[in-house]
Amino acid sequence: MAKVVGISISAEKGVPKENIPLGEFIVDHGVKGDAHAGNWHRQVSFLGQESIDKMGMENLRSGNFAENVTTEGVCLYELPVGARFQINDALFEVTQIGKECHQHCAIYRQLGDCVMPREGIFAKVLKGGTAKPGDELILISF
């Protein structure tokens, strides 16, 4: 079963995010209270716990790589653009796999590497809803 491990937000871009107990996802916006939110193609960022574990460092947690949603049990970066998945009532569509890192962010400077540009994904919110750690992630189309 694929599931949510953590929900995280930050007031600015390119920094580790703080974990929150419940995320509110807003259509054509993203996660309420997050700096990346807005009407564009990278409204919500996702990263697998499996990708974080590849870094081989202790004390890494959800949000360390500036992802909004940390998941477990699905290989996110293998999903194609256009794939859709659901967490509770919230519906997401994958819009981008990985990203170009023009400037090394705070995460890279602190850890010497960042897995987000290689294995993180971005999505738009098609239907709003809420999510919390432990909620199931259901693939709808891929």
Image (tube, grey):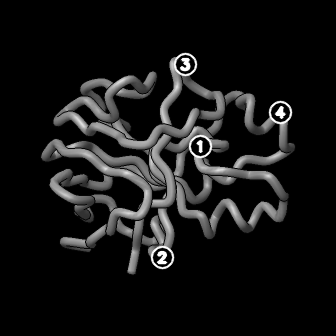
* Mark nearer the viewer, 4 or 2: 2
Callout 3 amino acid: Glu
Q: Earlier in the sequence, mark 4 or mark 2?
A: 2
Where's residue 105, x and y in %?
Answer: 71, 30
User: Residue 89 sits in which quadrant?
Assistant: bottom left
Which residue is depicted at the point 33% across and 48% down? 123
Residue toward you, 66 or 39: 66
Q: Which residue is mark 2?
A: 73
Callout 4 amino acid: Arg
Instruction: Give the side of residue 90 with respect to residue 53, left or right.
Output: left
Marker disc for residue 63: 1
Q: Give the spatial CA distance, label 3 vs label 1.
A: 13 Å
Q: Earlier in the sequence, mark 3 or mark 2?
A: 3
Which residue is depicted at the point 62% across and 28% down? 14
Where's residue 115, x and y in %?
Answer: 67, 53
Residue 67 higher or lower than 26, as above or below = below
Label 2 environment density (alpha carbons within 10 Å; few <14, some 14–19, many ≥20): some
Marker disc for residue 12: 3
Residue 88 higher or lower than 17, as above or below = below
Q: Which residue is mark 4?
A: 109
Residue toward you, 121 or 86: 86
Whether residues under marks 4 and 3 lie with C-beta atoms below 8 angstroms apart, the answer is: no
Whether residues under marks 2 and 1 lie with C-beta atoms below 8 angstroms apart, the answer is: no
Marker disc for residue 48: none
